[in-house]
């Protein structure tokens, strides 16, 4: 089963292909994707690489974490699985406001 790795600290010039090439020395790369802004198309500075096996993934983390790619020091770690139901984040204004009730100071 493929293991997904998070790769952070990427240069804006790093492409999905150059990301793949950096990881090939560690084993079989199933996929490599640089995440881009949906409007500008510019890299957001991180991406994901799927390695074929857990051994390949661990080798990639130990070999490449803290190394330089395209002039930037990258961070490589096993990606956190994305939960199926949101969680985390802000309340988005639901429920009672954090400020409490109306102001008790008269407005005159």
Image (tube, rainbow, N blue to C red):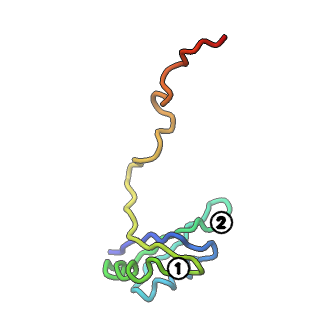
Could you tell me how many numbered marks the image carries? 2
For the residues labelled 2 and 1, say whether their Cβ atoms are less than 8 Å apart.
no
Residue at 38% over, 80% down:
62
Position of 26 with respect to 9 (left or right) is: left
Element type at marker 2? loop
- Determine the image quadrant of residue 29: bottom left
Q: Quadrant of the N terminus?
A: bottom left
**Dot in front, 2 or 1:** 1
Q: Report the residue marked by disc 1.
A: 19
Farthest residue in the bottom direction?
Answer: 25
Residue 71: x and y in percent read: 59, 80
Q: Are there few (<14), some (14-19), or many (20+) residues within 10 Å of tag 2?
A: few
Residue at 46% over, 46% down:
89
Give 90 or 99, whichever is nearer the viewer. Answer: 99
Element type at marker 1? helix
Q: Report the residue marked by disc 2.
A: 41
Residue at 36% over, 82% down:
59
Using the image, determine if residue 36 lies above or below residue 72: above
Residue 75: x and y in percent read: 47, 72
Give 39 or 71, whichever is nearer the viewer. Answer: 71
Q: Quadrant of the C terminus?
A: top right
Whichever of labels 2 and 1 marks the residue nearer the N terminus, that label is 1
Q: In whole angstroms, how far apart are the C-alphas of marks 2 and 1? A: 17 Å
- Determine the image quadrant of residue 81: bottom left
Give 58 or 83, whichever is nearer the viewer. Answer: 58
């Amino acid at each position: 089963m493929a293991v997904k790795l998070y790769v952070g600290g990427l240069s804006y010039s790093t492409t999905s292909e150059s990301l793949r090439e950096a990881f090939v020395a560690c084993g079989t790369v199933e996929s490599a994707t640089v995440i881009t802004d949906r409007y500008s198309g510019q890299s957001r500075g991180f991406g994901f690489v799927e390695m074929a096996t857990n051994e390949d993934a661990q080798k990639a983390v130990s070999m490449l974490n803290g190394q330089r790619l395209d002039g930037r020091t990258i961070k490589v770690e096993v990606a956190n699985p994305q939960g199926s139901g949101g969680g985390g984040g802000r309340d988005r204004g639901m429920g009672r406001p954090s400020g409490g009730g109306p102001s008790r100071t008269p407005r005159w």
